[in-house]
Image: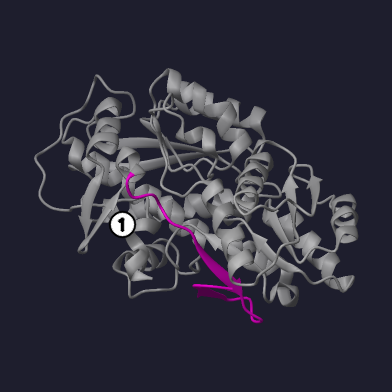
Amino acid sequence: MRSSIVSILAAFALAFGASPPPRASADEVGVSADTILFGQAAALGGPSSALGQGMRQGILAAFAEINAKGGVHGRRLELISRDDGYDPDRSVMATVKLIEEDKVFALIGAVGTPTSIATVPIAAEKNVPFIGPFTGAEFLRASEFQNVVNIRASYSAEAEAWIKHLTEDLHLKDIAIFYQDDSFGRDGLAGVKAALARRGLELAAEGTFERNTRAVGAAFKSIRRAEPQAVVMVGTYGPCAEFIKLARRSRFNPTFVAISFVGATALARELGPDGSGVVVSEVVPFPWNTHLKLVADYQAAEKALDPSLTPDFVSLEGYLSGRLAAAALERAGPNPTRAEMLRIINEVGRFDIGGDIVAFGNSAHDQPPGVFLTVIQPDGSFKAVDKL
């Protein structure tokens, strides 16, 4: 796993030490003499709340760790989170409030493709950094959105990994897809179709469901009729779990592969014994591999924030976003601006972390973040695997 860390991480770094006394930045929104304010619009309630809450916990753990060591150039990092329920209209309202009323310096830890499609243009218009969105949507990599800082692999990269392993490791050809019927699901659908086409294959079947529902019956019937050997899943934990449980009860047992956005820990919890053997692709390091210093730091930071928290992929991604924000601010100096933070991320973007050179922003194009596979075990834990 350590050998792949450069490709897995989209990045972060932080140097602590003595800093000159800061002065209030009257010219930059969200920066005061002693704080830098970040805002998060995410699903904190509702059927996808585990995703927003996980990102929030990870960011808070990173900020608390940084603040305990003196902050960044003497300023504490603070987070305001607003619930958007994984709904684009609510996300627009939450984002506007964060920018115009709360006057945050940057946005961080947004959750979802449809919500990001609605809110990224709002942030871009004011050049507000949009850091670490929990989505691998392709549009976030468009050159027009220079304010977006991706730290994860794209959904097309995840789709390529799925199809590569299913066809090469298991020699499967009949592959179906179960996906959310919106921009998120269609992004995954396009990636899967492209990966299959590169191998001269087509989808065996498709089935869809509506966002924020568990109405999967029609999709299940459609896919079940085709009797595919594998079903790849582009959705959140609730509907994906519902689909798999229906399949188990019907003695329909293809190989199930779910996207990282599913929320792996929440999926395993929902499935219970039915989760054994389900594959989930991931885009951050294994959260239990404390041989990696960054994972050990993450676990320690979470325990310091709340001893009841347990490691998972989503909160680790939030933690990485928080550490990335701090790394860029550290480089920006004692009087940070949004523009300087983004310049550093996109033009510098390389740091030596414990002997590994990791990249983010534009620098990550030469060394893109990676994807690896995990398999849910009978007890609900996860095992990282190199092949299926």
Taking the image as shown, residue 363 lies to the left or right of residue 140, namely left
* Total residue callouts: 1
Depth check: 372 or 274 in front? 372
Looking at the picture, how far across and down is residue 352, in whole percent? Answer: 20, 56
The picture places residue 205, in percent across and down from the top left corner, at: 81, 52
Image point (54%, 28%), residue name: 119
Residue 371 part of the magenta-drawn span: yes
Q: Looking at the picture, does residue 385 appear above or below residue 141?
A: below
- The magenta stretch is 366-388
Reading the image, the residue beneath label 1 is 65
Residue 215 lies, with reference to residue 301, above or below; the image says above
Q: In screen coordinates, is 297 left or right of 357?
A: right
Q: Is residue 231 magenta?
A: no
213 or 359, nearer to the observer: 359
- Comparing 266 with 277, the one in front is 277
Name the secondary structure under disc 1: helix
Is 331 located above or below residue 31 in the figure? below
**Residue found at x 44% / y 27%:** 102
Q: Residue at x 26, y 41 (%)?
A: 328
Is disc 1 surrounded by few (<14), some (14 to 19) or many (20+) residues within 10 Å?
many
Q: Which percent across, then down, holds residue 212? A: 74, 44
Asked whether residue 75 appears in the rendered view, the answer is no
Vertical placement of 199 versus 334: above or below?
below
x, y percent for residue 66: 28, 52
Instruction: Name the image quarter holding the N terminus.
Output: bottom left
Magenta: predominant secondary structure element? loop
Residue lying at the far bottom in this picture: please name it: 378
> Which residue is situated farthest in the front direction here?
200
Between 385 and 316, the one nearer to me in the picture: 385
- Amino acid type at mark 1: Glu
Q: Is residue 39 visible?
A: yes
